Amino acid sequence: MFVPLFVKRRTAILIATAIALAACGGASVAELSDSESPASDITADDDSPVTIPIHLESMAAIWETDFSNSIIDLEELLVGIPLSDPRDAIPPIDNPQFEAVSESDWIQDPEPGVLIEIEGDARFYPLSVMTRHEIVNDEVGGIPVAVTYCPLCNTALVFDRRFEGETLRLGVSGLLRNSDLVMWDDVTQTLWQQVTGEAIVGEHAGKSLTPLASAIVRWADFRDTHPDGQALSSDQGFGLVYGSNPYEFYSSRSRPYNFYSGEIDDRFPALERVVGISVNGIDKAYPFSLINKVRVVHDNLAGQELVVFWGASDTADALDSGLIADAIGIGTGIVYNPFVDGERLTFVASGDTEFVDNETGTTWSILGKATSGELAGEELELLPHRNEFWFAWQAFFPDAEVWTG
């Protein structure tokens, strides 16, 4: 059952209502629910009872999700939108409309977006659009992908939608866990954690989607590096005007909205951004406040050599000012494989958006393209990573290492 179109048009109101309730601290999970009845039981495959929390009862009655198959405590799931069936009340884009870079005059230079490039097909998904929809089901370079963004955690990830012989359509469940978007698929109605890509409730619980390399980058850099690329257009058929931030002043807060109730590690501000990397089950964070001092970090994580570039310092904060183009600059952190033609390169920063390798003297852009020198025309391999908020990182990866220099 999908939320009717007239409900979808109330998306902005629902978001504002949910955020207001959380920000004021005046709504418990139960108060965001339509049900006041006691928690009920369903039966798992092994005939043992499974208790459904009060706030999930209406969903368990409607959805085909197998709530008896879960790798989490169901109490961890919070209702982010106060509807009995909140699925896709924040509507994903299933038929994305694009325009050529040369035609995208509505996007301003410092505005951030999600970059993905597959087989030469380079696309830019402005965060001003992603904050309103959170998921774009697309096909890039012939591969069906889900471009996802959780504004409450600032997590942008891209996943391959092909899974066990099916092509999934991912949607916004209306549920949150540790303030992070919980997605659902239209084949099994399994619930998926966006920040990890792991199925947490339902038929596929314990399995994971395949992440694809992506990055949050500045529009000016994408436009200059990919003149033949494409960007989401300003008309996606929902009657929305993009460019503003519905979560005004969120990243200026001392702690996230009350959708997150856990402890916050005080080594860094709760809403500081970190570059989060996961390789072969090993995780590591690189805080912006540290890497912006050195601009380049060389490291080895679980056997994977990597280099982190930090730059484009005026990349706008999509979650602060009401108008994203006018927001303060926060920069961006991007992770690459430093090997080119079998040779490991080491880099130093040169200006705000350029880097030079010590081995050949080649100049590289922040998007990993060699622009001049011996290796001109070469590209660094982009590695999967995130630019999430510190509180979200430590909530999902509490035992992970943190780079401190």
Image (cartoon, rainbow, N blue to C red):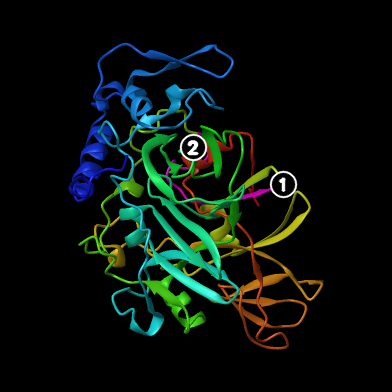
The circle drawn on residue 36 is: none
Q: Answer few, some or many: residues within 10 Å of disc 2's Cα (few below 14, many 20 plus, some between 14 and 19).
A: many
Q: Is residue 275 visible?
A: no
Q: Residue at x 53, y 18 (%)?
A: 44
* Mark 1: amino acid: Asn
Residue 28 placement (x, y as % from top left) = 29, 23
Can you tell which quarter of the image residue 186 is in?
Answer: top left
Dominant secondary structure, magenta: loop
* 52 with respect to 163 (left or right): left
- Tell me the crowding category of disc 1: few under 14, some 14 to 19, or many 20 or more residues within 10 angstroms, Cα based: few
Count every numbered label the image shows and give the total: 2
Residue in the image at 45% along x and 62% along y? 138
Residue type at the position of mark 2: Thr
Q: CA distance from mark 2 to mark 1?
A: 24 Å
Magenta highlight on residue 271: yes
For label 2, the SS is loop
- Label pair 2/1, CB-CB below 8 angstroms: no
- In-front residue for pair 383/258: 383
Q: Which mark is residue 190?
A: 2
Q: Secondary structure at mark 1?
A: loop
Relative to 392, say whether 52 is above or below. Answer: above
The quarter of the picture where residue 305 lies is bottom right
Left or right, 403 with reference to 44: right
Q: Looking at the image, is mark 2 or mark 1 nearer the viewer? A: 2
Q: Which residues are magenta?
A: 265-279
Residue 8 in view (yes/no): yes
- Residue hosting label 1: 280
User: Horizontal and vertical percent for residue 292?
Assistant: 54, 60
Residue 373 point in image, percent of width and height? 68, 88
